[in-house]
Image: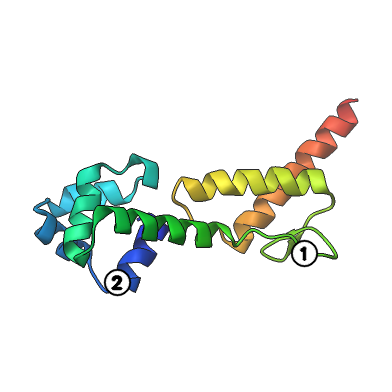
Amino acid sequence: MNPVLQAYLLENHISLSDVARRGHLELAVLKKMCRKSLNQWPIYFLKALAAATERSPEQILADILKLELQHTVVLRTDLDHLTIMDVPFANKELYEKARDLLLVYIRAGFSPSISDVKTVRRALQRKKQRTAKGQ
């Protein structure tokens, strides 16, 4: 399930069954939609969420966008060295590439862990070493 949607459901104390019932949707179809990123959700899905939470679709969308923003704020820069989730990077170039890759990962609906950040860092370092040897 999309981590942003999962957080939204938990914060509002509703389940997918509630959304399916109030939005007149099949649970299997709803579960399929929940795997997609925010920009792929159909309007009837937002309307079903609105019916389950007794809010307007516009409020639902605004709340979910706020959650997505909070989710991406996990990526940050320290003053003394470049880090993402406290994993240091050697230079600004590697940091920016890793940040961009992780933002794509988050926008696709996944929640990166510290091990994911370290894996990205190692891959970027290996790529840089290979290109340095090739020159």
Say what secondary structure mark 2 lies in.
Answer: loop
Residue type pointed to by label 1: Asp
Give the quadrant of the N terminus: bottom left
Vertical placement of 83 versus 93: above or below?
Answer: below
Residue type pointed to by label 2: Asn
Label ID, residue 78? 1
Label ID, residue 12? 2
Residue found at x 59% / y 60%? 73
Left or right of residue 114: residue 86: right
Say what secondary structure mark 1 lies in.
Answer: loop
Left or right of residue 102: residue 121: right
Residue found at x 57% / y 61%? 113
- Camera sees residue 37: no
Vertical placement of 79 versus 48: above or below?
Answer: below
The residues tagged by marks 1 and 2 sit, at their Cα atoms, a distance apart of 33 Å
- N-terminal of the pair, mark 1 or mark 2, is 2
Q: Nearer the viewer, residue 72 or 88?
A: 72
Vertical placement of 119 versus 19: above or below?
Answer: above
Q: Nearer the viewer, residue 44 or 102?
A: 44
